[in-house]
Structures are given as structure tokens and as C-alpha cells.
Image (tube, rainbow, N blue to C red):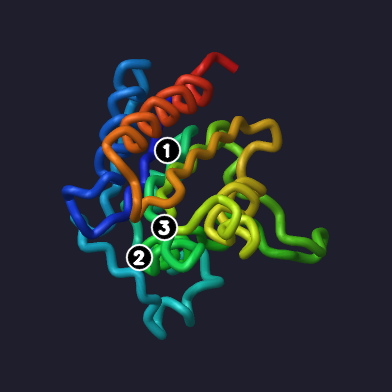
Amino acid sequence: MRALVVYCHPDPGSFNAAIRDLVCERLRASGAELRLRDLYADDFRPVMSREEWLNYLDPKRNTLPVAAEVEALRWCDTLIFVYPTWWYGLPAMLKGWLDKVMLPDLAFLMPDAENRLIRPGLQHISRLGVFTTCGASFWLTSLIGAPGKRTLLRGVGYLCAPDRRSVFAAHYLMDSSTPDSRARHLEHVARKMDKLLAPM
């Protein structure tokens, strides 16, 4: 198993860091090869420049600014996201990672003479994990439509293997969390990781 963990939080001491550490611990214990991308620590540049946009559809040039990220995405068979939900969705840093790394002819194949629709390009990824924290309640997040969860599980998920295994865990009401609620959530994350990593 080759796992790419994409982690996004500006505070090294956040609860998201504890989730990241547990996810990585479970991966190592399973014998998985692990690559961690800490977008803030790595100083990832999420804003797409004009030049990057102009080269977006050119597969010979669009990967050059994010070559290491692209190589890691091609390498992995397990993709895991750990991040805080802000305004019901993805932080700008993580959304920028998707914009700049999930490229045509890599993450998806553009329509052509034989194909009218966009086709998945990440079918080597058979496991997808999404772990987040939310300030809002489950009910309010669901009412809004949980756009961050949908972007990753449905949008990115569609690009992965059709028989992929997916897991999701969110700590809701994070702003009023307690040591007990956080400990219970880490136990929940551990169970989700066990499910994700079980033999297929």
C-alpha cells in the first residue's frame, strides 16, 4: 500500500494535527509506504497564476509547477485528506491544491474525438479517506449541503477506482469540543482507518 496524506492546517498544535498523527501512525503500523504533504509547512502556493491557467490544458507543461505533487499522486494507491472545514467547505489552501494538482490528463481525461465526457484518471487509487473538523453541527452542515465532503468523496472519488473503499469522519461542533469529545473522535478515526486499511 502506498499512501499519500494531504494535510492542511495553519496551526501545528491544532486538533487536526492529532488526527493527522493518528492517521499516519495507523498507516505505518499497517506496513504502508507513506508520503505526507503538509501544505502550510511545505509553503504550497495555492493561487493559480495566469501562466499556469494558460498552460492548464497542456499536459506537457501543466504539471511542471507542481511536479512533486503530481509524482506523489501518480505513486499512491491510497489518498487521505485531513483538514478543517471552514464555511462548510475546504480551506482555500486545500482548494488551491485541488485546482493546481488535479490536472487534465492526470486526474481526469478531457473530452476528445471519441469521448464526449470527462473520464476518470486516478483509477489506480483504491482507497480514499476524508477526516475533518467542523465548527457547525452535523444538522446545519447537512442543511447547507456539506460542500467540502461532497467535493472530496464525490468529486475526487469519481476520479478514483470505481470499486474504491471510502471513509469519512468529522468532529462537529469543534468550537465547543471537550477533551472527552476529542478523545472519542480519535477513537472514531482509528476505527475508520482500520476499515480503510482492511484487506480488499
State the separation of the CA atoms marked 3 and 1: 34 Å
Going by the image, does 107 lie left or right of 55? right
Residue 100 showing in the rendered view: no
| Residue 88 position in % (x across, y down) | 50, 63
Q: Who comes first in sequence, dot 1 or dot 2?
A: 1
Identify whether 93 is placed above or below 176: below
Residue 102 showing in the rendered view: yes
| Residue 30 position in % (x across, y down) | 37, 16
> Which mark lies nearer to you, 3 or 1?
3
Which residue is pictured at 27% across the width and 37% down the height? Answer: 179
| Residue 200 position in % (x across, y down) | 60, 17
Q: Amino acid at mark 2?
A: Met
Q: Give SS at disc 1.
A: helix
State the separation of the CA atoms marked 1 and 2: 22 Å
Q: Give SS at disc 3.
A: loop
Which residue is pictured at 34% across the width and 46% down the height? Answer: 177
